[in-house]
Image (cartoon, grey):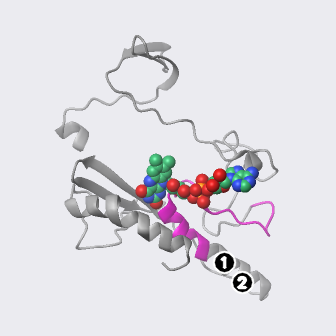
């Protein structure tokens, strides 16, 4: 929506394979072959991998998309390991379709804990993680979008009626730049 509004052309399915900072040329592998592009400004996202200790353990997916990247083979609802039932995976290492955000951890941890406590008590837990993911996107100085969604891509706004998820808003910018850090720190201290 914003790309269209700002006349930004997008090109997908390209993997950066080389970069020449002197000539400002980036080389990409595409479905058709190799492509070179000049750039004025380049922002590179490194390939995402699970940390070595998890990647080189028996815990990752053994096949499929997530095996090579080493994400842990957990059930996407219970977060319980598929082959080691006494192991749970929360946070970025969890091999689930969405949820690689700190905000997701807030909803994942209580699910894992509920199952652990139920196991200890010899009971069953019906707690499930729904894929909650939160992407605060700065779209310009003073404006941002706070897009929250679940596994099914349903929008799951935390502040319905206050923060519209698909609009650029100053309040989302204030939240991203000023409010989130103290919130996450409180979360780590168990206060949120
Ligand atoms: C640029 C950027 C912006 C982001 N913005 C947001 C945002 O606005 N909102 C949001 O919700 N999320 C955001 N995220 C995502 C968020 O940072 C992660 O989802 C979150 O940090 C995951 O937490 P984690 O504890 O699972 O993993 P991590 O935070 O990666 O913690 C894992 C820890 O394990 C340590 N470790 C690794 N190997 C070992 C070992 N062998 N022994 C001991 N320790 C080890 C690592 O050093 C690290 O400290 C952002 C991420 C990036 C990169």
Range of residues picked out in magenta: 82-110
Determine whether the beta carbon of the residue marked 2 sits less than 8 angstroms from the nearest atom of ligand 1.
no
* Residue closest to the far left: 5
Q: Which mark is residue 156?
A: none
Percent x, y for residue 186? 48, 74
At a point 41% along the width and 32% down the height, the residue shown is: 43
Residue 12 relative to residue 61: left or right = left
Q: Quadrant of the N terminus?
A: top left
Residue 181 relative to residue 8: left or right = right
Percent x, y for residue 89? 68, 62
Residue 162 falls in which quadrant of the image? bottom left
Residue 36 relative to residue 173: left or right = right
Determine whether the beta carbon of the residue marked 1 sits less than 8 angstroms from the nearest atom of ligand 1.
no
Contact? badges 1 and 2 (CB < 8 Å): yes
At a point 54% along the width and 35% down the height, the residue shown is: 46
Q: Is residue 44 visible?
A: yes
Q: What is the secondary structure assignment of the residue under circle 1?
A: helix
> Above or below — where is 11 with respect to 91?
above
- What residue is shown with label 1? 113
* Residue 107 within the segment the image draws in magenta: yes
> Above or below — where is 172 with respect to 186?
above
């Amino acid at each position: 929506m914003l790309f269209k509004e700002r006349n930004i052309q997008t090109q997908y399915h390209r993997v950066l394979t080389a970069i020449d900072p002197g000539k400002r040329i980036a080389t990409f592998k595409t479905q058709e072959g190799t492509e070179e592009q000049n750039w004025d400004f380049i922002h590179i996202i490194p390939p995402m991998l699970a940390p070595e200790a998890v990647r080189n353990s028996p815990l990752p997916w053994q096949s499929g998309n997530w095996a090579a990247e080493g994400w842990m083979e957990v059930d996407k609802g219970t977060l319980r390991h598929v082959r080691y039932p006494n192991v749970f995976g929360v946070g970025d290492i969890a091999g689930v379709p969405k949820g690689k955000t700190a905000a997701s951890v807030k909803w994942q941890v209580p699910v894992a804990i509920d199952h652990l406590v139920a196991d200890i008590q010899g009971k069953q837990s019906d707690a499930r993680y729904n894929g909650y993911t939160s992407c605060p996107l700065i779209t310009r100085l003073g404006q941002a979008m706070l897009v929250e969604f679940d596994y099914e891509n349903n929008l799951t706004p935390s502040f319905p009626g206050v923060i519209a998820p698909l609009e650029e808003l100053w309040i989302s910018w204030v939240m991203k730049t000023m409010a989130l850090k103290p919130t996450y720190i409180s979360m780590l201290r168990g206060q949120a």
